[in-house]
Amino acid sequence: MLRVSKLTDYASVILTHIAHYPNGLHTASDLTSATGVALPTVSKVLKLLTKNNILISHRGSKGGYTLAKEPSQTNIAEIITAIEGPISMTECSTLTGVCEQESSCEVKGNWHLINRAVYTAIEAVSLADMVTPVRQQAVSVNMPIVSKTSDLKVES
Amino acid sequence: MLRVSKLTDYASVILTHIAHYPNGLHTASDLTSATGVALPTVSKVLKLLTKNNILISHRGSKGGYTLAKEPSQTNIAEIITAIEGPISMTECSTLTGVCEQESSCEVKGNWHLINRAVYTAIEAVSLADMVTPVRQQAVSVNMPIVSKTSDLKVES
DNA sequence: CACATATAGGACTATTTTAGTACTATATGA
DNA sequence: TCATATAGTACTAAAATAGTCCTATATGTG
């Protein structure tokens, strides 16, 4: 009922593999072998991740990719945003002027709230968590109580 | 970075309107006037919502649609599922056998975890909350601590 | 300094998903 | 029995996504 794109899925698999060997330099073709994802696709994903500061690239011979930060410092929200861009649950949360009903829309503010709750949930899961098998981790997500006077902003 | 379909967006607008007048009977054409969404589209959304027990339909002359439950008893997760079906963040969370890497996939279990966190977040927002303007509500979402011995199941 | 190895960037095509529409059948109240 | 309204299904068009390919650029090593 909510979905990330296949590319994002690949990104999670690729990054999880890299995070297993956080000090190594990984080439696109190494990662193809390791993950089974086609080379041009791996390449596309790696470029997007580099552009968004999740990976660092080293060009030329003996080049490859490494993590830009420690696995615990990269979260799922960043990964999804890197691949899919800053798109929120509804269009009106990212772009203004697309929806004709926008000015009179009653639910806009509430979607912002939902966005924020979802964002908080996925932000709480780091790449380090992805490396750890499920049963050993515990995740706790807290949606902050909304103040009666402050505006909500969905950072994405 | 995560999105619901336009139809789901329309559903939220339509249902919010109905929830404002929870005792009235609403025809498809009434809802078109009220929301500005085209009639065939409104009609499609209403059928989906009826099929999934969010609305009850009354056929024939003087017919129309009413809520199947009180606004506080219908949540956003149900609405999204009604329109988009039981699709999770990644394909492997809903369907088995689609992904070739499934058997060796290291991240599958973790996506289940993320799914669950997101589901918990959107499940906490009811139609009654959508009727209330943003500033007067407070939402708190808690991701339960994952037991070290129990499996996680994403209900969707 | 040339060459092999890698990434960078962009353009392009095919596929899939989503949105939107239309048509026929069925139910019901007056 | 007729006007009104939903049910179900099939179809078309548009948009988003996935996947591929080509050319340019950087860099370590013999």
Image (cartoon, coloured by chain):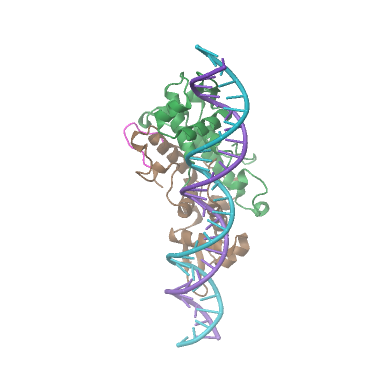
Chain colours: A brown, B green, C cyan, D purple
Is residue B14 on the magenta stretch? no
Depth check: A117 or A112 in front? Answer: A112
Q: Percent x, y for residue B42?
A: 48, 32
Depth check: B78 or A117 in front? Answer: B78
Depth check: A47 or B20 in front? Answer: B20
Magenta stretch: helix, strand or loop mostly: loop
Residue B61 as seen in the image, left or right of residue A88? right
Q: Percent x, y for residue B5?
A: 49, 41
Q: Quadrant of residue A32?
A: bottom right
Q: Quadrant of the C terminus of chain B?
A: top right
Label count reads: 0
Q: Percent x, y for residue B128?
A: 45, 26
From this viewpoint, is residue A36 visible? yes
Is residue A148 on the magenta stretch? yes
Magenta stretch? A144-153
Q: Is residue B20 above or below residue D11?
A: above
- The residue lying at 55 percent from left, 28 percent from top is B50
- The residue lying at 47 percent from left, 52 percent from top is A84
Q: Percent x, y for residue A127?
A: 52, 53
Q: Quadrant of residue B100?
A: bottom right
From this viewpoint, is residue A31 visible? no
Q: Is residue A131 above or below residue B145?
A: below
Q: Quadrant of residue C14?
A: bottom right
- The residue lying at 51 percent from left, 65 percent from top is A65
- The residue lying at 66 percent from left, 46 percent from top is B96
